Amino acid sequence: MAVDSKFQSMDIDVKIKKFTWRIQNFSSLEVKKLYSEVFTVDGYKWRIIIFPKGNHVDHLSIYLDVADSATLPYGWSKYAQVGFGVIDQFDRETSSTRVTQHCFNAREADWGFTTFLCLTELHNPKRGYLLNDECLVEVYVCTDKTLDFISREFIVKTDWDELKAKEADCVKAVMDNQKTPTTKPVEITLPSPTQSSSQTVATEPEEPAEEDMNTFFTSLESELSSSRMLYSKEEAKEALAKIKEALNTTPVNLNDSGKFSPLKQAIMILARFDGSSTTLTIEQKNELLDLEERLKELANRAAKAVQDKDQLTAKESIKQTMTCNLESSLIRYKEVETEVKQVDQILAALREEVEEAQKRKEKMLAERKGIYRSCKEMKMELDALGKELAECEATAKVGEEEEKSVEAEWGRIKDFISSIEAKI
């Protein structure tokens, strides 16, 4: 199923970036997990992950994830302070917000809240979390450890700056449109000189008379009494029940649940209720009117306390993660040290073999030179012998003829002696 969503980012401050994710047709989502578009903060690629039906819980789950953690170098880590907000589009100040800190690394590449917002509260039509079935998610990211700006108040108040900027843009657009012939002219009334002078001259107010003040406040009380809305006893009981229900929750849950708007109405009803047998004293009414601010203050203090505890937990988590990384690095250092020694031993053995081979080479080269010299001498002797051999062959032929001549002469001598012997 295709998911309709709009995503945009903006720089709130040089160090803080805000990312808005508007998810349309939220109630029709059938996916278990949904990813936002990838965005970049401080050179790292991030994305938002939400579980529309909860990550095995009955709450909306939301996390910030390092999108390219699998491709980052060994031992990487990145600190970030993160603020999450699911915006109540009826009343921004009742939005659900959470803030945390984390040192992202290969083991913990995503971080957030599994039980961020109860699903029944998310889908409550009286709340503005799914206005026109559109969920508005905001995430604030700061990677500077020296800053601690992101808070619930920071998140819910940030949008007013955007509205002011948009208002200024609209005024500028109107001024620019006056220059085009197709736009209807806007009439701008300037103050007259007398008005300007009257506005710039400060006058001392007249001292009121006692009778005038009494008359004014008597008339004002009469007007307020006639215009004041009267509430029934049942409405007062219902308002009281809402206040008691709110007080039965913890201050932190009251701060996150967005019950201040209906609570304000309930307090007003109870303060204005004036039954015949249950008339409230002025002190009680004043205390009721101050109750909303006191509850807000207590809720904010409780939220701050929880935030401080979460910050401690986050820093302890960072410390634990860094300790684990240090231990892993130490183990790897020792492994590398052992491997370097093994390589040194291999190199030493190889150096000995190289030296021995070099010696053998030198011997063989010397032997080769000796063979060369011997062969050269034998060749010279062979060449000289060739010349002598030719002379010897000629001499041998003469000797052979001489030998035959000697044998023939020798035979004649023998025959001569034999002839003499016969005569004797």
Image (cartoon, rainbow, N blue to C red):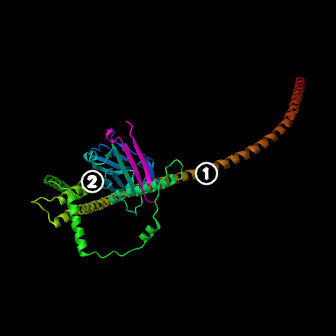
The N terminus sits in image quarter: top left
Q: Secondary structure at mark 2?
A: loop
Say whether residue 27 is left or right of residue 391: left
Q: Position of residue 104 (x, y in %)?
A: 38, 54
Camera-near label (2 vs 1) is 2
User: Looking at the image, which is closer to me, 287 or 422?
Assistant: 287
The residue to which callout 1 is attached is 358
381 is higher (above) or lower (below) than 202? above
Residue 406 appears left or right of 270 = right
* Residue farthest along the left direction in this orientation: 277
Residue 197 placed where, x, y %?
Answer: 44, 70
* Residue that mark 2 sits on: 258
Give the residues drawn in magenta, as a range: 1-29
User: Does 19 lie within the magenta span?
Assistant: yes
* Left or right for 401, reference 323: right
User: Counting other residues with Cα less than 10 Å from the Cα at mark 1, is it few (<14), some (14-19), or many (20 or more)?
Assistant: few
